[in-house]
Amino acid sequence: MKKKISNLFSWLFIALLILTNGTTKVNAEDKFVFIASGAEPNTFNTTMRMDDAAYVYDQNIFSRLVKLNINNEYIPDLAKEWEYSDDNKTITFKLHENVEWHDGQPFSSEDVKWTYDTLITEKWPKSDTFVNVESIEAPDENTVVFKMKQADASFLSKLSWYGTFILPKHLYEGTDYANNPANMHPIGTGPFKFVSYENGVSLILEKNEKYFGHVPEIDELIFKISSDPKTAYQSLINGEIDYLGGLSPSEANSLDENPDYRVFEYLGINRAYITGNLQDEKFKDGVIMKAIALAIDQQSIFDRVSNNIGQVATTFISPKFADYVNEEVGLPKTNVDEAIKLFEESGYEKNENGHYVELQLDSFEDGNFSDICTVIKANLEKAGIGININMMEFSAWQTKVAEDKNFDLTLLAGYQGPDVSGIEGRISINGFNNLAGYTNEEVENLLKEGVKEVDPEKRIPLYNKVQEIMAQDLPIIPILDYGYKIPLHNNFEGFPEERPDEAGMNEFTFIKRVN
């Protein structure tokens, strides 16, 4: 199964337009149009198959036990409350009562048990979330009990994130999951019901009058698919669009003083970084990655691509996990002379092109990746590292880099997970995004202990040590931490950015017109 590795929130543009009969703008509260850049879903079943485009839609169609808000906190969803046993190895969830699927069938704890049992057995994309789950029980229709092999401090955070939407057992059990019609005509328990999807045109959802939570304020969500964020922005300026869920860096500061908007700004747990193929013989002595770390000028990259939104990466884990950041072992300061000295002292010699080493940097078109690669090439050239940039379509990159591991260097970005333990996805031997093939037994043991330890005071030293080893081994070299600006039109209230106690990150249950 192919799985997309991408910058989940970067360059996702969502616009909101109020229409009647699809064309004329009026003062109506019931129709909303979202325009999402490049957001073509291949499936709506993101529990079975990762799909970044559908993830936004699914947060309005489906439900989870707990959901992730804009502040990267988990909040109640289908589970109204939960309780841990004294040893933290049993978690009991109490579910909302009288919940219905969108087709009118009753929802129960059996749907939860079936979904996650199947996810684990079939090894669906986020089965690693359940690695510490021993069993799942459904003692009555409104109770789910997870028996854990060991305490897992990250479990609820990961459960609120990706690949954990509850599926209808009555529609999937005993079927060919991959070809089930519900994958493209989804039936959920969320605040909005699926109406129709036309490839390349639109997705229409209508409010679920029987939603177990707050019934949506609006009648319809109409997601209109577009591949051009500049057009979406211009539509916003022209008054044709009322909500744009992410400004591109070039436009990020343009609405700060506009009286029609309040601008929501935040730093994401989303980082761009470069990694090498550490299983390739040329990287075995560690010299090349250390020289690259010394030669890359993160500030010059940030200045080129960010428009001062976000921040330069200086640490090995996201600064959003402030309590866990080891300030003593940050990234080295840019020093081209030291990079050259390292090559010389390690016995490297320049070739006829003036390079100590020549490498290919494989990447795919995703927002600012091309610009980042261009600056990296210029940075590394100064240290005698020749770079050939190979920009590909995502599918070609996925085959060459992610699957075949046929690469020297690659550029990646993406959400690091709602818990500090998310770093394991990038550096653990079993991490899905560990494209470097990095292995370190001590790191593996520390990561396992970090997940198991629930006391933050005992957990922090474990992740501090992980960062210390990362500084030596350089499995990844962080470049920048993405920031975001979202203009919220003063004609509306209830955006997910404003309702973190109740709304998921991309959940539009509470939006309503006020002017």
Image (spheres, rainbow, N blue to C red):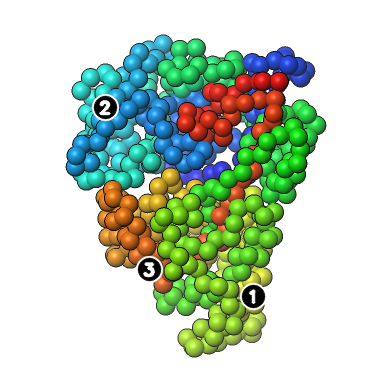
Against 222, residue 479 (above or below) is below
What element does badge 2 sit on?
A: strand
Packing grade of label 2 (10 A; few <14, some 14-19, many >=20) is: many
Q: CA distance from mark 1 to mark 2?
A: 57 Å
User: Does the residue at mark 1 contact the one at mark 2 (Cβ under 8 Å)?
Assistant: no
Q: Is residue 99 visible?
A: yes
Relative horizontal placement of residue 261, taking residue 71 as reference (left or right):
right
Occupied quadrant, residue 140 = top left
- CA gap between label 1 and label 3 equals 27 Å
Please name the residue shown 50% across and 49% down the image.
Answer: 269
Residue type pointed to by label 3: Ile
Of residues 327 and 120, the one drawn nearer to the viewer in this rendering: 327
Under mark 2, the amino acid is: Val
> Can you say which quadrant of the picture contains the N terminus?
top left
The residue type indicated by label 1 comes to Glu
Which residue is denoted by mark 1 in the rendering?
Answer: 381
Above or below, 20 relative to 383:
above
- Going 22% across and 46% down the picture, which residue do you hit? 150
Q: Secondary structure at mark 3?
A: helix
Q: Position of residue 308 (x, y in %)?
A: 67, 55
Specify the quadrant that holds the C terminus: top right
Q: Nearer the viewer, mark 1 or mark 3?
A: 3
Q: Residue at x 64, y 71 (%)?
A: 379
Q: Which label belongs to residue 144?
A: 2
Q: Position of residue 95 (x, y in %)?
A: 32, 22
Q: CA distance from mark 3 to mark 2?
A: 39 Å
Q: Residue at x 38, y 41 (%)?
A: 157
4 and 443: which one is in front? 443
Q: Name the residue carrying label 3.
A: 469
Q: Earlier in the sequence, mark 1 or mark 3?
A: 1
| Image position, residue 362 (x, y; %) | 57, 60
Query: Which is nearer the N-term, disc 1 or disc 2?
Result: 2
